[in-house]
Image: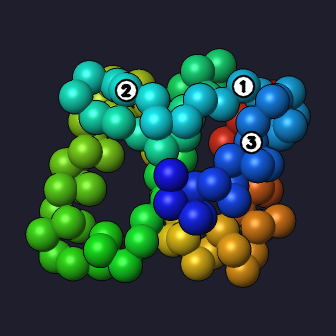
């Protein structure tokens, strides 16, 4: 895990976020997603600087479109956002829960 993934994982593991169970490094088809909540069909991706390059943006767009087509919701955060604005990140994740 990257430092940002490890930091966010501390707040997602063991059903800490509204009793939702998250898995990390979960495989869906031929993709490995950073975090996955099966009950919400929610995928969380954390992006480092490399994700700002045009080639990677294109790959991420294709990947997200495929995962959406399979019925998953994908949300993305920059690594820096996780460190600097964790309460907002957690709130946005919860906004995607079907309560």
Q: Secondary structure under badge 3?
A: helix
Q: Secondary structure under badge 2?
A: strand
Q: Position of residue 27 (x, y in %)?
A: 37, 26
**Is residue 64 at all visible to an observer of this figure?**
yes
Residue that appears at 46% across and 36% down: 25
Q: Which residue is mark 3?
A: 12
Q: Which residue is mark 1?
A: 21
Q: Which residue is mark 2?
A: 27
**40 left or right of 75 in image:** right
**74 left or right of 24 in image:** left
**Is residue 73 at all visible to an observer of this figure?**
no
**51 left or right of 94 in image:** left
- Relative to 27, does residue 83 appear above or below in the rendering? below
- Relative to 76, does residue 73 appear above or below in the rendering? above
Q: Position of residue 89 (x, y in %)?
A: 71, 62
Q: Position of residue 50 (x, y in %)?
A: 29, 74
In which quadrant of the rendered view does residue 23 lie? Answer: top right
In which quadrant of the rendered view does residue 71 lie? Answer: top left
């Amino acid at each position: 895990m990257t430092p940002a993934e490890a930091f966010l994982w501390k707040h997602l593991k063991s059903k800490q976020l509204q009793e939702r169970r998250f898995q990390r490094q979960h495989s869906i088809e031929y993709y490995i997603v950073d975090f996955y909540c099966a009950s919400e069909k929610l995928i969380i991706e954390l992006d480092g600087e490399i994700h700002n390059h045009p080639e990677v943006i294109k790959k991420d767009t294709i990947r997200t479109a495929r995962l959406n087509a399979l019925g998953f919701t994908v949300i993305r955060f920059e690594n820096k956002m996780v460190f600097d604005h964790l309460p907002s990140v957690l709130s946005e994740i919860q906004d995607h829960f079907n309560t």
